[in-house]
Image (spheres, helix red, strand yellow):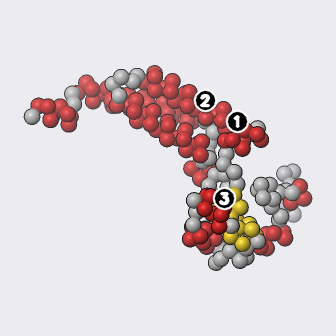
Amino acid sequence: MDRIVHVLFGDFPTVLDAVIKTSALFVTAALLFRFTERRTLAEFAPFDWIAAVAAGAIVGRAATASDTSWLAATAALLCLLATHAVLARLRFVPLLQRLIDPPLHVLIRDGQVDRRALRRCGLTVTDLDAVLRQHGHPDAARVHLAILEAKGAISVLGAETATSCPARVDGSLPAAAQPDSSPQEHQ
């Protein structure tokens, strides 16, 4: 019976250690993340997800592990966040960006659904139809482009967009269609 009680409740010093270490790790992680780039979940690239899950695993494992100190967990978090920051900066180098970020996939071009692209992306026609409806398109017929973006969202450009704002397949805009970045007076 004592064994069952010990398995379920442990001993007070061990529980107190876990409470102190968990609180310290949470505060440490919150402070470390305070100094990283601000990105929302919707903007996460695959390597962002990996970093978030790994950080959670470090905090979760170290909080209750009697053989892992707060200092070791903090060092692991610092290493993880530094590596993540370096990868985020390397994405600005075009050759490396292709290795880090997944490529764009054109799913619809001028009303024609590319079923091979859908299969490569692990999407069904039903998935695509749901996204089209969310963007206000009942079907693919009046869609100029639907692109699976590097971060997993699907951008949908209607047929009317093709004439007013020609987007390239890589997602960039021609110089003539770029929004003016200089401040202008509104009249």
Residue assigned mark 3: 148
Mark pair 1, 2: CA separation: 11 Å
Observer-side mark, 3 or 2, equals: 3
Q: How many marks?
A: 3
Image x and y of residue 182, in percent: 87, 51
Mark pair 1, 3: CA separation: 23 Å
Mark pair 3, 2: CA separation: 29 Å
Sequence-first tag of 1 and 2:
2
Circle 2 crowding by C-alpha within 10 Å: few under 14, some 14–19, many from 20: few
Q: Determine contact: label 1, label 3, CB under 8 Å.
A: no
Task: Give the answer, above or below, for where 82 lies relative to 52.
Answer: above
Split into 4 quadrants, where in the image is the N terminus?
top left
**Position of residue 128 in the picture relative to residue 166 (left or right):** left
Sequence-first tag of 3 and 2:
2
Image x and y of residue 10, in percent: 21, 30
Image x and y of residue 104, in percent: 70, 54
Residue assigned mark 1: 89
Q: Determine contact: label 3, label 2, CB under 8 Å.
A: no
Q: Nearer the viewer, residue 82 or 99?
A: 99
What's the residue at 46%, 38% (across, down)? 56
Instruction: Tell me the number on the disc at residue 82.
Output: 2
Q: Disc 1 marks which amino acid?
A: Arg
Observer-side mark, 1 or 3, equals: 3
Sequence-first tag of 1 and 3:
1
| Secondary structure state at the residue bearing disc 2 | helix
Q: Disc 3 marks which amino acid?
A: Leu
